[in-house]
């Protein structure tokens, strides 16, 4: 999507405490990555980080012109309260300011920036203050300890006139994979098979947005002066850029990761603003965000940058012992529990259309509905094309049984084979079973949590008795 806005100011909130990866390696006697991470103290959180960054931005800004505020975080302090409203009040913005909270994804920061662009370009707001901050903790002793850092960043987005960097275009790719997640009752994020994450969850959507943003802008690879990509590890972004012909030494710009770690929803915007501070008028910058898909943003410098906020913030850091870091945040207690079930990211990716949206296949020749991921029709054996077919969410019970030995909170577990309206048959667990289902009963399909294998919720469809409407 093309844009008519730009970035007028920015600020950073980088905790002064630093945790050396060398200290973590020595504590667990295991190899890791070089560098250090910025970590919060006991009185800091994502809200205080966001506030600190925002105060830098509005120091020389007329608050009356800020008509929108967007706060992005995966570690929001409140599960039920708007941090955006709280920040707007603390910053002295009017009670008519449009306040939006964005979370649930590592791409929350880039989504917030895109939303701000749309609000300004569409004329809803003269300027929007975008704040992103995260305080992501990792399980002690896990590989993520060498990666996760804490930081906040704020950007003022307004019309392109007078902006330091003009935002030319942005695009998105939504893709749901369980590469990284954290449930509402867990403190530490979980990660899936890393090879799957690199090849599927990361590489494919990032390649898509990179291709589309270059097509939208008309840029060639050589036209890009700096490319700022989020990378979930030390190699994935380099591999992607090298494959597409970028000169890593000249174009790849990551001033933040080696010194701060991966700072969650704030990370791409931290990297972007740090890159802007190193750019001159006319330079072109590409920013690639990642998390539940990918996003891309193309910018061009309209002025020489005179700011050095990032450099000054880095100079304030000091190292702390690893044991003090653990004690300050009480990190030795784990709250993640698996129920012993089985899950496979590869199998889940292969079956995602059916598992999430009940997308099956139908044979063009004989009309058979096929739920399994088969290359051809097993009924007519004709070399015909299978077309996409969405299964109905209502049907009739063909057979039913009850499992008295399967571990379930409400035994026995009902299992029903259902002939779906319009074609197709599935064997499903029974939900909300107030009384046993019978053959011939009408049922509806409902999307429910199946188990918690891998310390995360795994979902699929179940069936329940179809409600009878009173006449």
Image: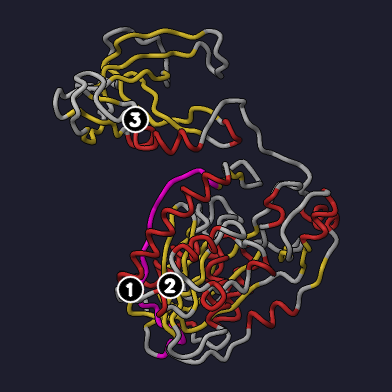
The residue labelled by disc 2 is 68
Secondary structure beneath dot 3 equals loop
Nearer-N-terminus badge (1/3): 1
- Measured in 3D between alpha carbons, the distance from the residue under mark 1 to the one under mark 3, in whole angstroms, is 46 Å
Q: Quadrant of the N terminus?
A: bottom left
Q: Quadrant of residue 385?
A: top left
Q: Nearer the viewer, residue 8 or 366?
A: 366
Describe the colour scheme in one phrase: secondary structure
Residue 28, image x, y percentages: 82, 48
Q: Residues within 10 Å of mark 2 (few under 14, many from 20)?
A: many
Nearer-N-terminus badge (2/1): 2
Secondary structure beneath dot 1 equals loop
Membership of 466 in magenta stretch? no
Secondary structure beneath dot 2 equals strand
Q: Which residues are magenta?
A: 162-179
- Measured in 3D between alpha carbons, the distance from the residue under mark 2 to the one under mark 1, in whole angstroms, is 9 Å
Q: Residue at x 48, y 74 (%)?
A: 129
The residue mark sitting in front, 1 or 3, is: 3
Q: Nearer the viewer, residue 103 or 351?
A: 351
The residue labelled by disc 3 is 373
Pick out the residue farthest to the left: 365
The answer to whether residue 421 is left or right of residue 187 is: left
Q: Quadrant of residue 238?
A: bottom right
Residue 246, image x, y percentages: 47, 71
The residue labelled by disc 1 is 124
Residue 168, image x, y percentages: 36, 77
The answer to whether residue 149 is left or right of residue 344 is: right
Whether the residues at callouts 2 and 1 have beta carbons within 8 Å, the answer is yes
The residue mark sitting in front, 3 or 2, is: 3
Nearer-N-terminus badge (3/2): 2
């Amino acid at each position: 999507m093309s844009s008519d806005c730009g970035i007028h100011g920015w600020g950073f909130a980088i905790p002064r405490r630093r945790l050396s990866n060398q200290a973590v390696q020595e504590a667990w006697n295991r190899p890791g990555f070089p560098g250090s991470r910025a970590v919060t103290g006991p009185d800091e959180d994502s809200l205080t980080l966001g506030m600190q960054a925002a105060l830098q931005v509005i120091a020389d800004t007329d608050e009356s012109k800020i008509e929108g505020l967007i706060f992005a975080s995966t570690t929001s302090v409140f599960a039920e309260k708007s941090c955006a409203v709280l920040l707007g009040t603390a910053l002295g913005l009017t009670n008519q300011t449009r306040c939006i909270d964005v979370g649930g994804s590592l791409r929350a920061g880039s989504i917030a920036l895109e939303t701000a662009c749309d609000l300004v370009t569409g004329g809803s707001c003269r300027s929007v203050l975008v704040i992103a901050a995260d305080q992501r903790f990792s399980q002690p002793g896990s590989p993520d300890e060498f990666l996760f850092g804490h930081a906040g960043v704020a950007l003022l987005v307004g019309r392109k006139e007078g902006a330091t960097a003009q935002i030319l275009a942005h695009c998105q790719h939504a893709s749901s994979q369980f590469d990284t997640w954290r449930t509402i009752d867990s403190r530490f994020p979980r990660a899936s098979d890393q090879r799957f994450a690199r090849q599927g969850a990361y590489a494919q959507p990032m390649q898509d947005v990179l291709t589309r943003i270059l097509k939208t802008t008309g840029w060639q690879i050589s036209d890009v002066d700096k490319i700022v990509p989020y990378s979930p590890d030390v190699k994935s972004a380099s591999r992607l850029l090298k494959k597409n012909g970028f000169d890593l030494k000249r174009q790849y710009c990551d001033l933040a990761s080696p010194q701060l770690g991966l700072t969650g929803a704030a990370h791409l915007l931290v990297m972007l603003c740090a890159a802007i501070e190193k750019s001159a008028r006319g330079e072109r910058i590409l920013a690639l965000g990642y998390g539940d898909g990918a996003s891309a943003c193309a910018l061009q410098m309209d002025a020489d940058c005179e700011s050095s906020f990032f450099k000054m913030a880095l100079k304030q850091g000091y190292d702390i012992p690893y044991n003090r870091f653990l004690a300050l945040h009480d990190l030795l207690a784990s709250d993640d529990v698996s129920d012993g079930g089985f899950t496979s990211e590869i199998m889940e990716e292969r079956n995602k259309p059916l598992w999430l949206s009940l997308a099956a296949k139908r044979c063009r020749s004989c009309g058979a509905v096929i739920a399994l991921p088969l290359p051809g029709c097993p009924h007519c054996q004709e070399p015909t094309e299978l077309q996409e077919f969405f299964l109905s969410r209502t049907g009739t019970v063909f057979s039913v049984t009850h499992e008295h030995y399967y571990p379930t909170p409400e035994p026995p577990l009902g299992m029903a084979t259902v002939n779906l309206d319009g074609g197709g048959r599935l064997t499903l667990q029974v939900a909300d079973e107030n009384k046993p289902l019978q053959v011939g009963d009408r049922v509806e399909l409902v999307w429910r949590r199946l188990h918690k294998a891998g310390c995360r919720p795994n979902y699929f469809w179940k069936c329940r008795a179809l409600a009878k409407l009173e006449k």
